[in-house]
């Protein structure tokens, strides 16, 4: 009896260690039924990360306008003053509803701010690509994530019209076939996938997924001195970016969060923001070419490349946008297909379309009404299947 109890606890411990994890933007852990206190701090200073990357230098050329960056995370507070108008309703894979633009935990809002926070009077912090739009895909409300939810969240991001980049600040130690399939769908849809490299370098530096999948741009973390952060993993590293002692938007209020607790979770959105700048300025480049451009133009460390600790180096926004790469050719490249891979649609009502598609459909319906002489037309929208059943059918 005692031996079976021990085996049960060992099994539970193994499951817990295999769960994907997030790096919270503040020290206290958050229970499933408890939200973080609203962010109220008004911080006027620039972060060292902004000074290091100097993204404002490239804004006269591109701010990432027109790019949609899916943030697979805890949701995003779309009401934050520096994010308002740049966050869609998104999707929640936990409830199968179009409801990703809220955030109890705060991690996703912190990530989204690094990508697309707007300049504000008296505030020093801004995002890398303020012209971009964030598509929040909620995969969890706590510090851990089920692999199934992570795979479903990536698949949901692929389905959203116009998603150009997916940021994944979650890691897992296992090569799960559902996760691999979701990432392959994204890559086949010509979407840039940026993923955190992981934070366990001091505990074995094991490969983390989805960061090490072929085609994914894995982001490691550096500190303010330019050194690799001690926790930042090195397996399959693509580039590195600031990941320690950062400032970004906080959930539930109007203020910012200064987080001394860093992680590759926060390095990834710096790289995803640069990808948005590149894709906006070079719309004919494929996702693979965008990844190559970011790696080729990084601030390279001395020695053979890729370097074991820094990959191709520290991401360089200005060089990534402006550098001339002979391998891209002198002639304009044919625009690649951006159509998402066909999948069964998620359950719930159609997402409110903020790009104008909804208005076009409404105009077409009105034209039908006028031509037919009818006074009113109501077209019911049937509910569609959830992500879990859709993925089961696909297998």
Image: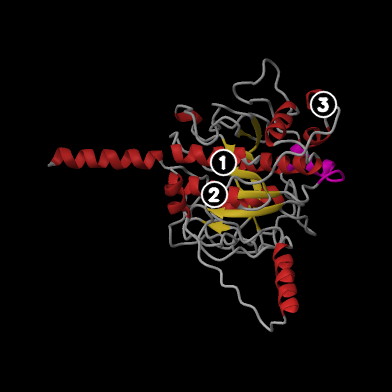
Quadrant for the C terminus, please.
Answer: top left
Task: Report the magenta stretch's main SS.
Answer: helix
Residue tagged 2: 343
Q: Is residue 297 left or right of residue 392?
A: right
Please tell me whether mark 1 or mark 2 is closer to you in this view.
Answer: 2
Q: Point out the residue furthest to the front here.
A: 372
Q: Are marks 1 and 2 in contact (CB under 8 Å)?
A: yes
Please tell me whether mark 2 or mark 3 is closer to you in this view.
Answer: 2
* Residue 329 badge: 3
Q: Position of residue 296 (x, y in %)?
A: 73, 26
Q: CA distance from mark 3 to mark 1?
A: 28 Å
Question: From where the camera sits, is residue 319 visible?
Answer: yes
Residue tagged 1: 185
Q: Position of residue 155 (x, y in %)?
A: 54, 47
Task: Point out the stretch of residues depicted in magenta.
Answer: 48-62
Q: CA distance from mark 1 to mark 2?
A: 9 Å
Which sits in the foreground, 48 or 85?
A: 85
Tag 2's secondary structure? loop
Q: CA distance from mark 2 to mark 3?
A: 34 Å
Q: Residue at x 75, y 47 (%)?
A: 129
Q: Position of residue 148 (x, y in %)?
A: 44, 46
């Amino acid at each position: 009896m005692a031996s079976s109890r021990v085996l049960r606890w060992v099994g539970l411990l193994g499951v817990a260690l295999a769960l994907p994890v997030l790096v919270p933007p503040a020290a206290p852990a958050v229970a499933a039924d408890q939200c973080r206190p609203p962010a109220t701090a008004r911080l006027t200073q620039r972060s060292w990360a902004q000074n290091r990357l100097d993204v404002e230098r490239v804004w006269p050329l591109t701010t990432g306008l027109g790019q949609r960056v899916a943030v697979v995370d805890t949701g995003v507070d779309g009401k934050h003053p520096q994010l308002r108008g740049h966050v869609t309703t998104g999707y929640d894979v936990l409830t199968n509803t179009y409801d990703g633009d809220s955030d109890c935990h705060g991690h996703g809002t912190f990530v989204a701010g690094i990508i697309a926070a707007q300049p504000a009077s008296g505030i020093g912090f801004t995002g890398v690509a303020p012209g971009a739009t964030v598509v929040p895909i909620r995969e969890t409300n706590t510090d851990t994530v089920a692999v199934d939810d992570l795979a479903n969240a990536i698949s949901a991001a692929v389905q959203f019209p116009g998603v150009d980049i997916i940021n994944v600040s979650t890691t897992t130690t296992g090569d799960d076939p559902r996760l691999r399939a979701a990432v392959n769908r994204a890559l086949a849809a010509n979407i840039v996938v940026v993923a955190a490299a992981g934070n366990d370098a001091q505990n074995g530096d094991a490969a983390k997924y989805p960061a090490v999948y072929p085609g994914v741009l894995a982001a490691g973390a550096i500190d303010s001195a330019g050194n690799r952060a001690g926790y930042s993993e090195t397996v399959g590293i693509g580039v590195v970016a600031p990941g320690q002692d950062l400032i970004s938007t906080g959930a539930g209020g109007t203020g910012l969060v200064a987080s001394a607790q860093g992680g590759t979770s926060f390095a990834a959105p710096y790289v995803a923001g640069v990808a948005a700048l590149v894709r906006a300025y070079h719309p004919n480049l494929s996702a693979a070419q965008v990844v190559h451009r970011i790696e080729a133009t990084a601030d390279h460390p001395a020695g053979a490349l890729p370097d074991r600790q820094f990959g191709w180096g520290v991401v360089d926004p200005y060089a990534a946008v402006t550098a001339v790469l002979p391998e891209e050719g002198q002639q304009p490249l044919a625009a690649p297909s951006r159509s998402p891979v066909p999948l069964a649609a998620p359950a719930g009502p159609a997402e409110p379309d903020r790009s104008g598609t909804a208005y076009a459909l409404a105009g077409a319906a009105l034209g039908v009404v006028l031509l037919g002489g009818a006074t009113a037309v109501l077209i019911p929208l049937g509910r569609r299947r959830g992500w879990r059943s859709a993925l089961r059918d696909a297998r």
